[in-house]
Image (cartoon, grey):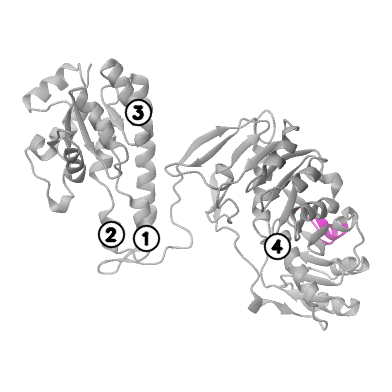
Amino acid sequence: MAVERALISVFDKTGIVGFAKRLAALKIEILSTGGTAKLLRENGVAVRDVSDFTGWPEMLGGRVKTLHPKVHGGLLFRRKHAEDEKQAREHGIAPIDLVVVNLYPFEATAAKAGLTEEELIENIDIGGPTMLRSAAKNFESVTVVCDPADFERVAKEMESAGDSTLATRLELARKVFATTARYDGMITTELERLSANGHAALQAKPRLPERVHLALRRQQELRYGENPHQAAALYVPAGREPEGLAAAKQLQGKELSYNNFVDLEAARSLAAEFKNPAAVIIKHNNPCGAAEQTTLRDAYLKALACDPVSAFGGVLAFNREVDAATAEEVAKLFVECIATPGFAPRAKEIFAAKKNLRLLELPPGGLEPERELQLKRILGGMLVQQPELGGLNDSELRTVTKRVPTPEEMHTLRFAWKVAKHVKSNAIVFAKDGATVGVGAGQMSRVDSVKIAVMKAQSPLAGTVVASDAFFPFPDGVEEAAKTGATAVIQPGGSVRDPDVVAAADRLGLAMVFTGMRHFLH
């Protein structure tokens, strides 16, 4: 059945003039409203106002334009359904076979500085979602387009056969309901900003929303999940462009797995902590080496020296474009994946010899810290927390020992603290000269994490500093570190045995700094 009539009412007018001209060339009557109708007429497209079609004017400051039985009857009545067609004739309802609608920019409006209550409320689209839902429900007869990216496909099908295919209409209907679900979810969350003490007033967003609405679309199927018998895919937020690692461009290598992405994100997030050239090596979601130096090559070599055995088959991240000198060193090691803001042309040539090595180029902003709520599933529910954005606050740092750290020790303590934030708890990091020397991760006892870090170290630990992601519950961890020649410790403090731990540090000649902040990572 050929399309006779289309209703076009869009806020985002990208591509709409060209699309409407193609419809007009097919002798399709075009209904429209407000600014859309004005734009189309200015560009030579014949348009009939919706108010003329319904016999009712736009009213209530534009709140009511398309909420009319002639619009929704035209969208919803079932073609070739005897009773529906009879009632449509009786009530003068003409078919609307195509709807092109996108919505008020509620998300962008809600993010504006200086937003008012009126702006927030008036940017809740009512007519648009209602038309979209009516058209999508009747997808067997009606084509509905809510995304300019679909204009070309729909136009070609109509130019070829007079109508879109059922498969296309069903796909577009699914997209509509995904769009309106996400839109309503955003509104639900943003309305939590309003108080109602006599009148609606904006207030600060709550630390955690009462309701969390997730709208995700599948972007990429993965080789497998944590294990080969588990299916997995990468999903990204619907309705906006992918960001961060999810937007990275894979330049070469095998298909990525679930574990690859988990390790890549661990590497990316740690590399993002540093301002100077930095290299990070991750194995099973833990750093086995990290360094910040004056050149990327030196940073990589120092990171590798921390634990070269564990680095085999690891995942790397850099916070600078990988140059040829760094690539030549990395190419000597078997590596699964590399994520970085870029690769120099010669570096690409060097890595091209390793066909299975996955190279991922991060987009602009790909080294920004994650600022979205963090989610973790449990059986029957979801745990939600704020992202871990805590950094060292100079005003809260307290030297608690008799000896104060030297400037060099303090510089290295800061480095070690950044790394410890990204090590699974219980976490212990030995560091020296801007590089990790030993890492103890994920142990049930903190003193065992110290012992493992010592055991894993490939270089002498004399003159190193130690970072602990949480307090030392007993002096034994500090005592073990001191045996190796470590000279300074950074830790949150907060244990009931802090006086005993500090006394042990004083007895051993260590400098100790309390941060007042814990960095557990589970």
Q: Residue 112, which numbered label?
A: 1
Q: CA distance from mark 1 to mark 2?
A: 10 Å
Nearer-N-terminus badge (3/2): 2
Cβ atoms under marks 2 and 4 closer than 8 Å: no
User: Residue tagged by mark 4?
Assistant: 418
Q: Amino acid at mark 3?
A: Glu
Image point (32%, 36%), residue name:
146
At x 31%, y 32%, the residue is 145
Secondary structure state at the residue bearing disc 4: helix
Q: Is residue 223 left or right of residue 157?
A: right
Within 10 angstroms of label 3, few (less than 14), some, or many (20 or more) residues?
few
Instruction: Tell whether position 416 is magenta.
Output: no
Task: Give the residue at the far bottom of this rendering.
Answer: 402
Q: On the image, which quarter does residue 391 sit in?
A: bottom right
Foreground: 438 or 499?
Answer: 438
Helix, strand or loop under label 2: helix
> Residue 404 at what x, y percent from top left?
80, 81
- Residues drawn in magenta: 438-451
Frontmost of labels 4 and 3 is 3
The alpha-carbon separation of the residues under discs 4 and 3 comes to 49 Å
How would you rate the neighbour count of disc 4 (Cα within 10 Å): few for under 14, some for 14-19, many for 20 or more? many
Q: Residues within 10 Å of mark 1 (few under 14, many from 20)?
A: few
Instruction: Give neighbour class at mark 2: few <14, some 14-19, many 20+ (Cα, 10 Å).
Output: some
Instruction: From the image, tell me which residue sits under label 2.
Output: 119
Q: Is residue 396 left or right of residue 156?
A: right
Q: Which three-letter amino acid code belongs to the residue tagged 4?
A: Lys
Label ID, residue 152: 3
Measure the alpha-carbon separation of dots 2 and 4.
Answer: 41 Å
Mark linked to residue 467? none
